[in-house]
Image: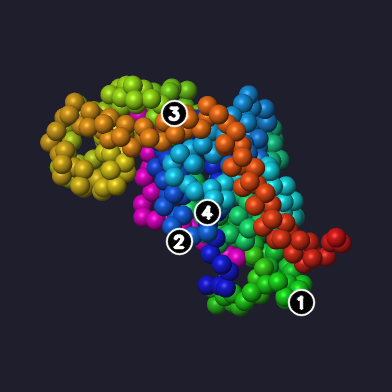
Amino acid sequence: MSEFNKLVFSGVQPTGNLHLGNYLGAIRKFVALQEGNDCIYCVVDLHAITAQLVHEDLRGQIRSIAAAFIASGIDPEKHIVFNQSAVPQHAELAWVFNCVARIGWMNRMTQFKDKAGKDRENASLGLLAYPSLMAADILIYRGTHVPVGDDQKQHLELARDIAMKFNLDYQDNIRTSGLGTDIVVGEEPVHAFFPMVEPLIDGPAPRVMSLRDGTKKMSKSDPSDLSRINLMDDEDAISKKIRKAKTDPDGLPSETEGLKGRPEADNLVGIYAALADKSKTEVLAEFGGQQFSVFKPALVDLAVNVLSPITGEMRRLMEDTSHIDAILKKGGERARVRAEKTMNEVRDIIGFLR
């Protein structure tokens, strides 16, 4: 599509405990994407204050996300791991994008509607402008690809809209400055400074649901700790939560068709499949016809086997946070160099004096 160098960007908010859904749906993919890609992984702490300004232990949460990145296998030497607030260019470009984006675009964002609820007038301006900052997070590095879940696809489309409007509004300046590259969007040639970001979708993402209600996503904010497996849970906690996970009285079917209308059974089979890197069909070929009294212990063993090394390394890193802090500091310094290069060019394109 373009001459932009491929760069993968993604971030995780430091709000609440990371759980199995975060690991299977995001962090494990981050690790896989390291192979053959230039990657930047960010703890998006500026996003954390959009809905809730005051956090009791924001620094601890930032460190915990970074520890999960490292413990899961992300290499901070080959790639960049940092916290967003350490790179002020994110916020500076977000202001430019606030002036590019239209209020109507923001009002259409379903996540804002969901999070603001009925009392939209009382929501923070930051919550409304959240997608503009997300676009800046990616495009300050001229990122080309982002691994996304279903809940972020609309925001990625908005990032493309913002990039395109900037490119079109400043078409002449970009061409005069020699900073852009020719791309084709649809059938139209555009001289672009910012790339059209593409989603990275590597097969169907595992949708990990609550252990107490198979119709709801596993969530950090669920009041019941039994609803999720936290990455910092020990073996006993993992075992207890899986054994207490809601099921139905029937045994496991032999084919995936038999999981329809059985959300809790479907969820547990899906978790097993994701942890084992198998399809649900393969899992049911092994356990079809068995009762949950047989399947749950097998799931416990598998979950403990996969998660215990990560949990152990996270605990070790969090006991002495100096190593995590050093990784974030170095990552922030490396990220700032890249971000400032982009921001300098944006200032020139817009016409700011510097």
Question: Which of the numbered marks, if any, corresponds to residue 33?
Answer: none
Q: Residue at x 39, y 30 (%)?
A: 229
Which residue lies under the disc numbered 3? 232
Amino acid residing under circle 4: Lys
Question: Mark 3 touching mark 2, by CB under 8 A?
Answer: no
Amino acid residing under circle 1: Thr
Question: Mark 1 touching mark 2, by CB under 8 A?
Answer: no
Determine the CA span between mark 2 and mark 4: 11 Å
Q: Is residue 203 magenta?
A: yes
Q: Residue at x 21, y 47 (%)?
A: 281
Determine the CA span between mark 1 and mark 4: 35 Å
Q: Residue furthest right?
A: 353
Query: Front-most of 354 and 157?
Result: 354
Which residue lies under the disc numbered 2? 36
Which residue lies under the disc numbered 4? 78
What predominant SS class does the magenta segment belong to? loop
Amino acid residing under circle 2: Gly
Which residue lies under the disc numbered 1? 176
Determine the CA span between mark 4 and mark 3: 26 Å
Quick one: label 4, few (<14), some, or many (20+) residues within 10 Å?
few
Quick one: label 3, few (<14), some, or many (20+) residues within 10 Å?
many
> Quick one: SS at disc 4?
loop
Q: Is residue 118 above or below residue 343?
A: above
Q: Residue at x 45, y 61 (%)?
A: 36
